[in-house]
Image (tube, rainbow, N blue to C red):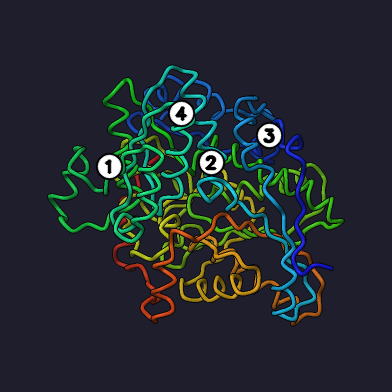
Amino acid sequence: MSDQIKYVLDEENIPKSWYNLNADFPTPMPPVLHPGTHQPVGPSDLEPLFPMELILQEVATERYIEIPEPVRDVFRMWRPAPLIRARRLEQALGTPAKIYFKYEGVSPAGSHKPNTAVPQAWYNKQAGIKKLSTETGAGQWGSSLAFAGSLFGLEVLVFQVRVSYDQKPYRRALMETYGARCIASPSNETDCGRAILEKTPNSPGSLGIAISEAVEVAAKNPDIKYALGSVLNHVMLHQTIIGQEAIAQCEMAGDDPDVIIGCAGGGSNFAGLAFPFLGLQLRGGRKRRIIAVEPAACPTLTRGTYAYDFGDTAHLTPLVKMHTLGSTFMPPGFHAGGLRYHGMSGMVSHAYELGLIEARAYQQVGCFEAGVQFARTEGIVPAPESTHAVRCAIDEALRCKEEGKSETILFNLSGHGHFDMQAYINYFEGKLVDQDYDEADLATALAGLPAVAA
């Protein structure tokens, strides 16, 4: 038997619908509120930023939403993504556990992000939009939207968090190769960017700041819409293609995961894998342990407060009830740039509050150690974000070894690290160190949460 076994569906088995966990939550999610009135937002409040089809998906409660055939046609470029059993890693760990990973690095942009970038670009194209603005941390989302924009003839403007802009020049080059314009954030191109630079000229930036800049551009220009790569309900929806494929592939493998793991920044790749399995559970299926893994330097679920908060630093966005570190929280510049967000998806946060999922936080050195072990056994270099899921999967496999349990572990390898090799260089040279957030800064950020009546 091969050391590495792939389970690959035929392209005609690409899911025809997205799965919406909102249909199966035992209690409904708290409403999204208007930042000025603190009343639930309506479609007209979101129209300056999004096309109507995405707004309807944002508030949808039906269980399945059809994937347009032109979107499925693009998905055929790389989907279905493989499910792989990591036998070599199992052998190296000496564990009785079975370890599977869903590999999303096979997409043109190298991550799971095109799963939502393609439909978002398509819906905007159908609405007559010609330009999109967005933000990106590590660049996975920015390069994915740039890719999708190139397919549908859309201009794409990307505000990339300054620390990642400097750390990851090749990801920036990929965006530009796809035709996007990439700007370091905070920038002098927006009012909120200029205000931050005036106060902190050497600001490393944050996803909250970059979101503010991208939202400001869209809000001020009627011919530009905004696209977000995580956090929002319609993004979670689009990513469920991952978990739906994984359910079918686990059936092919004759297995059923006991533990499901994904790294979590805004929550999209975690939700994409976990939500379809969680839906099975909520509809009467068996219970599994589902673990969201985040960086200890930006511990939104494990350290944040469940409260209404802005999604951006300049307070231009609606208020979402989520686990948050405060919209002004500035995380240290650790290498998993895609996990440096102050908030968590409202859907993921709601699942956590209901006790349906677990959360765990890791420091980056241990994650890179796990990423290197994975690369040396399975041959794939994980993105810094994905190493958090790898770390957790290895720890769970070692737990099974200690307890003598032969559980099945499934994790989402959300992207490859080919554009993140400087981080690995730093790790090998001993320059990569664990970083902690400032407790005083966190306290200040949480003290500034908006006052919203219960």
| Badge nearest the viewer, 4 or 1 | 1
Q: CA distance from mark 4 to mark 3?
A: 19 Å
Looking at the picture, how far across and down is residue 145, in whole percent? 45, 38
Work out whether residue 90 or residue 307 is closer to the camera in this orientation and state it: 90
Q: CA distance from mark 2 to mark 1?
A: 27 Å
Looking at the picture, how far across and down is residue 373, in whole percent? 59, 75
Q: CA distance from mark 3 to mark 1?
A: 33 Å
Which label sits on residue 314? 1
Looking at the picture, how far across and down is residue 165, in whole percent? 31, 54
Residue count near mark 2 (Cα–Cα under 10 Å), binned few <14, some 14–19, many ≥20: many
Q: Amino acid at mark 4?
A: Pro
Reading the chain from its start, which is encountered first: label 3 or label 1? 3
Residue at the location (46% across, 24% down)? 124
Q: Amino acid at mark 1?
A: Ala
Q: Which residue is mark 2?
A: 114
Quadrant in the picture for residue 319 = top left
Q: Which residue is mark 4?
A: 40
